[in-house]
Amino acid sequence: MNEKGRVAVFLSGRGSNFVSLYRDSLKTGANFRIEAVVCDRKKAPGLKKAKRFGIPAYLLSHCEFSSQAEYEKKMIDLLKQHRIDLICLAGYMRIVGESLLRRYPNRIMNIHPALLPAFAGLHAQKQALDHGAKASGCTVHFTDAGTDTGPIILQRAVAVREGDDEETLSRRILKQEHRAYPSAVRLFFSGRLTVVGRRVLISENEK
């Protein structure tokens, strides 16, 4: 049996997408496992969840380092220690810097609560409502130097209902996030994703 892919999850908050990935990694036939969690906020509930699951969890506060480069050097050292193949950003509220992108090209994923390229950045659900969008959803994409601008892997649409507010729309989108993210990670470790320019091609068969 092939060795499972090794994933590190970066988070800043409650970690609901982290929990979704973790649960999927325990299913029969899963081709990845979560080896480490990195968090930049001491009181983040996701950090406590990682410890409860028995996953090595690291608190790395940006303010404790003199520069972004030094901060990411510490991250890279941890990732090398755990032989990480893929980084999953799950509510991680910091911009990924150049050194990390260079070390892990097309090996850093993010999930965003909108159908990119629409409504990038913060408060995506509110943006959709303010613009009168009839549909929103979520996007899993590879991370690049921009804000939510990397090549799109998967998207799931969610209808905007009459009477929706930010909370109700966010809740329905989150359910789709919990389905889309594990699917994208499985595709990655099946060797079915190929990045060609701005496009991510998904092959029918595993490599």
Image: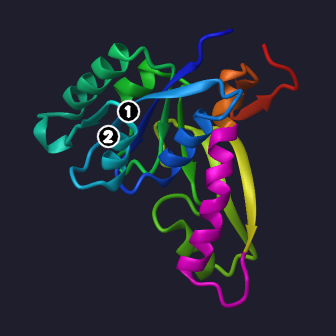
Give the farthest residue toward the top: 1
Q: Amino acid at mark 1?
A: Ile
Left or right: 50 as drawn, with respect to 4: left
Q: Position of residue 19 (x, y in %)?
A: 50, 47
Label 2 belongs to which residue? 51
Q: Which mark is residue 55?
A: 1
Quadrant where the N terminus is found in the figure:
top right
Residue 63 placement: quadrant: top left
Residue drawn 72% across the image and 50% down it: 155
Tag 2: amino acid: Lys
Marks 1 and 2: CB-CB under 8 Å? yes
Q: Compute the Cα span from label 1 to label 2.
A: 6 Å
Q: Position of residue 181 (x, y in %)?
A: 62, 44
Q: How packed is label 2: few (under 14 Cα within 10 Å), some, or many (20 or more)?
A: few
Position of 80 relative to 86 (above/below):
above
Secondary structure beneath dot 2 equals helix
x and y, in percent, of residue 197 in the image: 69, 28
Q: Which residues are magenta?
A: 160-183
User: Is residue 136 one of those drawn in magenta?
Assistant: no
